[in-house]
Amino acid sequence: MEGREFGPRRSRETTKPRVVCPKLIFYHCKHCGSVFQLTSMRKEISPMCCDEKMEMLSTKDPSEISDDIIIDYKITGGYNENVVEVFWKIKNETTSLEWIYLRTFTGGQLKYVTNPKKTSFVFALADEDSYVYCDEDPCLECTFRCKRGFEIYAYIKDKAIVKIPLERMHANWQS
């Protein structure tokens, strides 16, 4: 890494950061379809919508909705720049992806799918969220799993919230 300078988005952490962003709980209004998100620190709150308590939504595993949509991710970038790319393929034309939320070490990012022809989002990372163990570019998604603790939440309209933890170890450098 000699001769390299730290970029403005590069993490200055010397060890992998702890996940400080609390778990998420999602609520749904059965009347208007609104979805509301709270952190798990606030479980005692029961959100209201349309003069009624909202129902808590449980998350599903990607395998449970694989007949309708395939959602996956890839970590790209390295030393100074790294991102999480989330991509999807809709298999059932009645399925509609509304938004994707990336929960990171320190917070999260939310992106709405406003163009039905769009098939991916790129979530840029900075500070502690951009921590990497090595200087490989592109990321090898190796045994160090630098983004372990991150989670992707995808809301499929009127069907489910899918939760995908970023804990895969992918040996793409061996192929």
Image: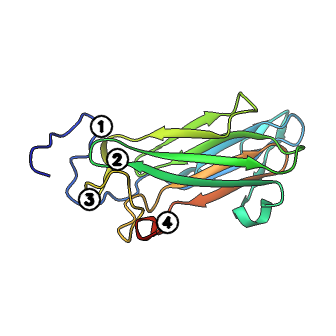
Residue furthest to the left: 2
**Nearer the observer, disc 2 or disc 3?**
3
Task: Indicate which disc, 2 or 4, sits on the residue closer to the N terminus.
Answer: 2
Report the disc number at residue 130.
2
Label 1 sits on a secondary structure element that is: loop
Local crowd size for mark 1, using a 10 Å CA cut-off: few (<14), some (14–19), many (≥20):
some
- Is 117 on the left or on the right of 122, as rendered? right
> Residue tagged by mark 4?
167
Is residue 40 visible in this depiction of the protein?
no
Q: Residue at x 64, y 52 (%)?
A: 25
Residue under numbered circle 3: 134
Residue 107 image position (x, y, % from top left) = 45, 44
Residue at numbered disc 1: 9
* Residue type marked 4: Glu
CA separation in Å, label 2 and label 1: 7 Å
Q: Earlier in the sequence, mark 1 or mark 4?
A: 1
* CA neighbours of label 2 inside 10 A, class few (<14), some (14 to 19), many (20+): many
Tell me, yes or no, whether the two marked residues, 2 and 1, touch with CB atoms within 8 Å: yes
Q: Does residue 102 appear left or right of residue 163 in this picture? A: left
